[in-house]
Image: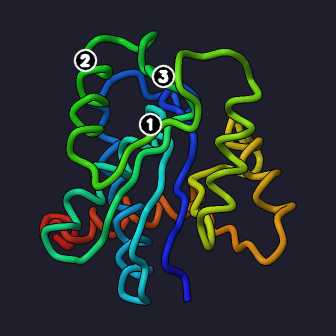
Amino acid sequence: MMKIITVTGCKPMELTIFSEEDPRIEYIKKALEKRLIALIEEGLEWVLVSGQSGVEMWTAEVVLDLKETYDIKIGIIPPFEQQESRWPEALQMKYQELLFTVDFSQPIYQGPYKGPFQFKARDQWMIEKSDASLLLMDEENPASVRYFYEAATEAEDYPVYMITPSDIDDVVEEIRMMDPAYWE
């Protein structure tokens, strides 16, 4: 039974999202929510993210909303302290707020960024501590998620679930169909 899942995916700029007001974020969050609810109903207890901007922060927000209905916990495990230090101020504030709201948060390495090895160690830790992963990724254009994907698919007995662009399109269509005007 799957109790812990790691969720990751593209960063906003890899999805050509340059504003937190972009309407596509709601579709992505809805796709994440749909997948997570199905997993929670099968016994999922924990969701782990490293807190990167984009899919991981949106996942944390989705899980925090789901906590109102489901018994689910969220942990943010950044690769190092102050990973948000170079982000825009509004995003830094949002990240700090999430750190204070989640059930668990602890960086893999104490101190600031020292090198790419920290990301590799983060990926390995996430894979070892979870039963499976859920990736929001386009296999034709995997962007930075490909490093986690490669590590995850090399791990033994480690399922990798995907949310693809096609899954997002399905969510968009479902939402459109919920509007009564769609049927007129």
Q: Position of residue 51 (x, y in %)?
A: 44, 38
What residue do we see at 54% from left, 82% from top? Answer: 2
Distance from Cα at disc 2 to Cα at disc 1: 13 Å
Amino acid residing under circle 3: Gln
Q: Which residue is mark 2?
A: 90
- Towards the viewer: 109 or 76: 109
Q: Is residue 64 left or right of residue 46?
A: left
> Is residue 130 depicted above or below 135 in this figure?
below
The residue beneath circle 3 is 83
Q: Residues within 10 Å of mark 3 (few under 14, many from 20)?
A: some
* Mark 2 surroundings: few (<14), some (14-19) or many (≥20) residues within 10 A: few
The label shown at residue 157 is none
- The disc label shown at residue 54, or none: 1
Q: Give the residue drawn at x 53%, y 33%.
A: 11
Query: Alpha carbon of mark 3 to alpha carbon of mark 2: how far?
Result: 14 Å
Amino acid type, callout 1: Gly
Give, as a three-letter code, the residue at label 2. Ala
Q: Is residue 25 left or right of residue 115?
A: left
Mark 3 or mark 2, which has the lower sequence index?
Answer: 3
Q: Residue at x 48, y 22 (%)?
A: 83
